[in-house]
Amino acid sequence: MRLLLRIFFLLSLLISLPLSNDIAQAQLERLRKGGPVEQTAVADTPLVEIPAGEFAMGLDGMQALEDERPKHQVWLPVFSIDIHEVTTMQYASFLAASDRLPPWQWDTVDLAKHHDRPVIGVDWSDADAYCRWRGKRLPTEAEWEKSARGADGRSYPWGNHSPTKEMANFALGARFSYSQVLMPAQSYERGKSPYGLYHMAGNVWEWVQDWYGADYYKVSPEQNPQGPEQGQFKVLRGGSWSDLPKYLLTYGRFKLTSGTKNSYTGFRCAKS
């Protein structure tokens, strides 16, 4: 069933809508001319330190999809990761300080109302560029999973019981609106991960550093895996506001081409 749901979701993303450039570009010009956002006025996301050590990555058995098997022990050095997803206000400060094109659906952003919502409509290179601008990087897939799962092998960031509306933002259908389907980056206190991270399940899918490999877990190094050297897709983690509970699993994997921009996907950064 999870495999069928994944295929259906992938097919739904094949329909691409063009960016509304006129409104988005006008807003961007206002930002770059000293509008409501200045680079120095927007705080970076606080980082949470994840201690060095081993954790169990993936899952064995029929509950796991083929690319989530086998369960294997991974050792990671100490690293830090953003406590929440990058927000529209934070991304606006990046746009104001760079020549980056605005994200898809940026014309619908009202910073007064949506400043604390996660930015969406960014492809992998947008996310990578933002993290580098902040002096950080995208987390590896292994770093992301440890941050969401902890060292006890839990199925969801909060434990092993299925998601509820008090734990995560999910299952809201397919119609997008910044105001109606996205929640503030620091919300759902009861759904935080073992390390205190927000929205490691639901709200938006999150780009990670790695290329996707369906069989990568079978050959993954035991220490600090970085993913395949190349590939056709990049990995995403965590599920979104639109997804059913089975997409919110800490070990669940998803893939998209690196140039994909949609209303389901955002990111957070990490630092060695």
Image: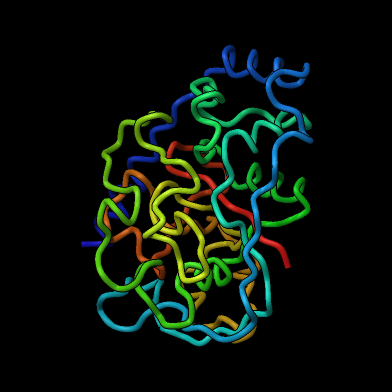
Q: Quadrant of the C terminus?
A: bottom right
What residue appears at the point 25 percent right and 56 percent down from the top-left corner? 164
Which residue is most to the left? 1
Total marks shown come to 0
What residue appears at the point 54 percent right and 66 percent down from the top-left corner? 144
Q: Position of residue 34 (x, y in %)?
A: 77, 19
Decide: is 23 above or below 190: above
Q: Position of residue 268 (x, y in %)?
A: 59, 52
Q: How is colour applied across the structure in the image?
A: rainbow
Q: Nearer the viewer, residue 107 or 65?
A: 107
Q: Image check: 251 left or right of 185?
A: left
Q: Nearer the viewer, residue 160 or 141?
A: 160
Q: Image check: 205 left or right of 62?
A: right
Locate residue 156: give its quadrant: bottom left
What residue appears at the point 52 percent right and 49 percent down from the top-left corner? 257
What residue appears at the point 46 percent right and 56 percent down from the top-left corner? 255
Decide: is 271 above or below 122: below
Locate residue 163: give its quadrant: bottom left
Q: Nearer the viewer, residue 41 or 143?
A: 41
